[in-house]
Image (spheres, coloured by chain):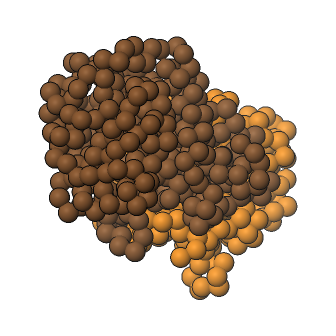
Chain colours: A orange, B brown
Amino acid sequence: MTPVFLSESESAALIDDELALTAAREAFLATATGSTFPVVIGHSSVPHNRFTLKSGSAGDLVGVKVGSFWPGNTDLPRHSSTIVLLDPATGRLRAVVEAAAANAYRTAAADALAVETLARNDSRTLTVIGTGHQALHEVRAVSRVRPIERVLVVGRRAGAAREFAAEVIARTGLAAEPVDAQAGVSAADVLVTATTAREPLFDATWVRPGTHVSAMGADGPGKQELPVALYERASLFCDLPGQSSTIGEFQHTSTVPVALGAVLAGTAAGRTSDEDVTVFDSSGFALQDLTLAAALLRRSTGDTQ
Amino acid sequence: MTPVFLSESESAALIDDELALTAAREAFLATATGSTFPVVIGHSSVPHNRFTLKSGSAGDLVGVKVGSFWPGNTDLPRHSSTIVLLDPATGRLRAVVEAAAANAYRTAAADALAVETLARNDSRTLTVIGTGHQALHEVRAVSRVRPIERVLVVGRRAGAAREFAAEVIARTGLAAEPVDAQAGVSAADVLVTATTAREPLFDATWVRPGTHVSAMGADGPGKQELPVALYERASLFCDLPGQSSTIGEFQHTSTVPVALGAVLAGTAAGRTSDEDVTVFDSSGFALQDLTLAAALLRRSTGDTQ
């Protein structure tokens, strides 16, 4: 069987939020039975140019995502992604999918799935902390699964927050405005953090009862977006408990979070009242990449989803 | 820059012992300055179908080799290999090289490099323990770097050893015969083990002074081909000391082996007399795969080596 190659331009043309959300649901449900293996964080000869290997298997999927972060990129995005699928019958190469653009959809889809599963149905105010490339994907994906009416934007630099709010208005038609952290957090029904922070971005007391929080940024030792005081009054969820507790947000607590996949499968409880504060930590796992690549390959050959 | 894809049939047509040896020398010299990252051993949904991720960087090379071992393969080899190179300037995908056939040359080239560096110049008798696919590559590669006149073959099954000896004669023109382990080990100038053994294959007392031993098989916890008693009278060398002492042959001793790359670079001593017993352990490392892929890519575009 000849391996299939999907180039960056092909996968970028095929990806959309719906495909990404379907693939995310498949991946999170597969966490109960699939396998993921230790994450490797490596670098090129220039040590600040880093790559990450995330590998796993579930059903007929087996492979690895090579994620890269080249902070000095100017013409190209700093993050890239290459997904390698092996043929489950032979171990030979089955497909290579370049997925730099698709990767942002994949990450935002995990957030959307968490919001769809855990946030109050009447969530109308979305606050996003972070004004980078990923943040816009988060706004778009989350607003597809809840009746979001306005977006509050919190950024370290006022200019960036203003520009980002303008971009949200232009791209989504939603109302959007820059606010300070306390105003944004205290007004949020859904609060999304999408930063590379290494210390808490807000005060736990600002979070209202009933809020859902998705922490998208922490994916390595030392990273942190949320105040640990929040954990005392919140229900904690994540993608992979073992990983979230080592390289994700929950490295900063001894509380063991619940796997979102278990909530989706009905084997664990999610939100239990409109007063609950729910927190979801996304550290990212290989099965998301494998199901994404498989969905892109199906769409590229005209298979219906 | 569009990624380059070299298929299995293309790389199999391009590979030869000379290219593999040149790439191996480059890789071993690069161990002094390059980086290798933790090895991942994963599996498909069928747990005995395993894959290994070996990643690293050196100079303008950065990437990962996905090795797979599907023991139930009948029409295809059980081992496959896919090498992924990233663009050092951007982190984007640079090339994918399928290298199942080439991988056997790459592994044998490490052995040939060790023999060229450590074995006596007048080595004429090569004994190989193991009659699998890899063993024939070892015979061919080693006989290119020393004046080998006869090959002694040791196998668990007499029929397999006879067939293998006949194949050596047919493929290399060298004299070859099946022998028992004691006869083979005690007559060897160069002794190569290429098995999946989990306990010693011979008695340390059988090894003559002046012998060079290359242990090619151990690449995981619990694997072992050599008797530990041999280490007391031998000089120990390997590809990567840290790796050899955890998943290679030297997991069974506390003696720290010398990196072959340091001998090649002239910063460590190799053989010091014709009476030395030298032992080289190959556990395999990513830089071998990265230099191999780069050399195959250069040859595919007609670049001179």
Residue at the image point whose x is 54% and y is 48% from the top: B17
Q: Nearer the viewer, residue A103 or B34?
A: B34
Q: Nearer the viewer, residue B205 or A199?
A: B205
Counting from the top left corner in percent of width and height, residue B260 is at 46, 26
* Any part of residue B229 in sight: yes
Q: Is residue B249 left or right of residue B95?
A: left
Q: Nearer the viewer, residue A188 or A56?
A: A56
Q: Is residue A9 left or right of residue B141?
A: right
Residue at the image point whose x is 63% and y is 79% from the top: A299
Within the image, what quadrant is residue B229 found in?
Answer: top left
Residue at the image point whose x is 32% and y is 60% from the top: B166
- The quadrant in which the C terminus of chain A is found is bottom right
Counting from the top left corner in percent of width and height, residue B187 is at 24, 35
* Any part of residue A145 in sight: no
Counting from the top left corner in percent of width and height, residue A143 is at 66, 65
Q: Is residue A224 above or below residue A302?
A: above
Within the image, what quadrant is residue A300 found in?
Answer: bottom right
Counting from the top left corner in percent of width and height, residue A271 is at 41, 60
Q: Is residue A267 above or below residue B37?
A: below
Residue at the image point whose x is 71% and y is 42% from the top: B305
Count every numbered label the image shows and give the total: 0
